[in-house]
Image: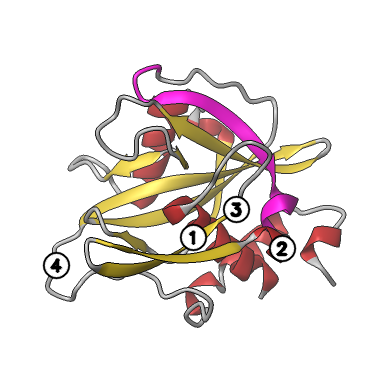
Amino acid sequence: MSLTAVPSISRHWLAQRLRQAHDLPADPGVLRYVHARDFAATQAAVLVPLINRPEGVVVMLTQRTAHLNDHAGQICFPGGRVDPGDSDRVYTALREAEEETGLARELVTIVGSLPDYDIPTGFRVTPVVGWIDPPVSYRPDPFEVAEVFEVPLTHFLDPDNHQRHSDEKNGRRRHYYSMPYQSRYIWGATAGMLHMLYRALRA
């Protein structure tokens, strides 16, 4: 059965699927960037917020402001580097999401995580998946976040919306996904994590 045809995606179903996410084989479609063994990556975490709207589950995403030094204007999940006082990656993801978007951490039920995702800027990111039942409101930090918006989860569960790319940058070939939605271009690490979510839920 196609995941896009699932009439209702529940929190418990998601948790069950995500328990198997770390056992998935490598993605045969895209050669993912991985840090060298001796590289001390900066640890980070993002929240993948799934909101149980009456019309169906949606994924909350943010667009970064244009003046930032890193990933300016790009679409991403709320998140950031692990602070020394953070107890674990879940705490980091919830703290950063609250700081960036105003999403109250007590509204989020953690249903699992996806495999760590290395990015060339030196970060190793843990995607933490959270389930949210409405009502929910946002108060984005105007310095970091230009906009908070939502995309139906079914858009990312349709493999026809997963576009594979490769190009050369600084003499090195890179591979990545994009998943455009309406006028928004979702690509890079964010699209890669969404593809991991798709594979976990499809498994």
3D distance between C-alphas at marks 1 and 4 = 21 Å
Query: Mark 2 sits on what residue?
Result: 160
3D distance between C-alphas at marks 2 and 3 = 9 Å
Please report the residue visible at 47 percent of the width from the left and 80 percent of the height from the top. 26
Query: Mark 3 sits on what residue?
Result: 179
Range shown magenta: 142-157
3D distance between C-alphas at marks 4 and 2 = 36 Å
The kind of secondary structure element at disc 1 is helix
Height in image: 108 above or below 122? above
Instruction: Report x, y in % for residue 192.
Output: 49, 60
Query: Mark 1 sits on what residue?
Result: 192
The kind of secondary structure element at disc 4 is loop
Q: Does the magenta stretch include residue 146?
A: yes
Check contact, mark 1 vs mark 2: CB within 8 A: no
Query: Mark 4 sits on what residue?
Result: 39
3D distance between C-alphas at marks 4 and 3 = 30 Å
